[in-house]
């Protein structure tokens, strides 16, 4: 069986491909149709794994630099008062301590941008999802080879029909597991995004109330 004959490039968006048409389940063609069904569900998993690994690259870059910027800003906030004293004259700091507050505000902004964009969390989430899918695919490929081996042991129509039904069931369960992983990851993303929106809304209301009290 050539599992690469239906190889295709993953789409820009993670979406299912067209289900194979005209599967022939007659006695002479049922195993060929099983192989086509296998190619379809296996490629669906391949597309999803590739999609997650490709999309995590941008999130990793943005998340890394935003978190690094926040760390640098926090460190700068701690150093500014010290530098101001060391470099100052006549007890007058060369750098206003107010810049430490500005630096802390920048750090908070960078962290907020990271959370709102879901860069660091998405990076980790994408990698974990892809790893789980890879393990799931490995188990499926192994089980499928056992299934193909069992085909050759069948000697009557009833047994061949049973092994065909088992193969269809294996493909269905595997595809369901892949779709469940995608759905779970999407649900986590939606929850994180909604939480980020709520945090932004609370922050805006808090600043508005502070301004009204002044």
Image (cartoon, helix red, strand yellow):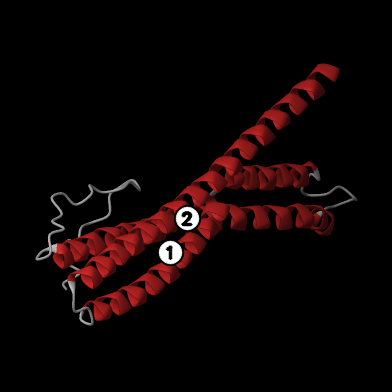
Nearer-N-terminus badge (2/1):
1
Q: Nearer the viewer, residue 10 or 31?
A: 31
Counting from the top left corner in percent of width and height, residue 160 is at 21, 70
As drawn, the label of residue 86 is none
Does the residue at mark 2 contact the one at mark 1 (Cβ under 8 Å)?
A: yes
- 103 vs 185, left or right, is right
From the viewer's perspective, is 99 left or right of 140?
Answer: right
Residue drawn where x is 23% and y is 63% of the image: 39
For the N terminus, the image quarter is bottom left
Q: Quadrant of residue 79?
A: bottom right
Q: Mark 2 = which residue?
A: 181
Residue furthest left as drawn: 28
Among the 4 quarters of the image, the one containing residue 109 = top right
What is the x, y in percent for residue 40? 25, 58
Q: Residue at x 17, y 61 (%)?
A: 33
Q: Residue at x 72, y 30 (%)?
A: 202
Where is residue 208 shown, x and y percent of the image?
Answer: 75, 22
Q: Is residue 53 above or below residue 106?
A: below
Return the x and y of residue 162 as percentages of the image width and height.
28, 67
Q: Secondary structure at mark 1?
A: helix
Residue 35, quarter of picture: bottom left
Residue under numbered circle 1: 133
């Amino acid at each position: 069986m050539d599992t690469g004959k239906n190889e295709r490039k993953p789409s820009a968006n993670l979406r299912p491909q067209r289900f194979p048409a005209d599967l022939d389940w007659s006695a002479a063609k049922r195993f060929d149709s099983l192989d086509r069904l296998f190619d379809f569900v296996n490629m669906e998993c391949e597309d999803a794994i590739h999609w997650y690994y490709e999309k995590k690259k941008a999130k990793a870059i943005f998340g890394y630099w935003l978190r690094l910027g926040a760390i640098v800003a926090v460190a700068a906030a701690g150093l500014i008062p010290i530098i101001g004293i060391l470099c100052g004259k006549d007890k007058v700091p060369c750098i206003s301590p107010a810049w430490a507050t500005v630096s802390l505000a920048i750090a908070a902004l960078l962290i907020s941008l990271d959370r709102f964009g879901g860069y660091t969390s998405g990076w980790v989430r994408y990698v974990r999802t892809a790893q789980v899918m890879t393990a799931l695919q490995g188990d499926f490929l192994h089980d499928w080879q056992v299934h193909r081996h069992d085909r050759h042991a069948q000697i009557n129509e009833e047994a061949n029909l049973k092994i065909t039904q088992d193969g269809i069931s294996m493909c269905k369960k595997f595809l369901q597991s892949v779709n469940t992983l995608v759905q779970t990851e999407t649900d986590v993303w939606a929850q994180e995004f909604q939480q980020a929106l709520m945090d932004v809304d609370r922050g805006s209301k808090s600043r508005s109330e502070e301004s009204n009290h002044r």
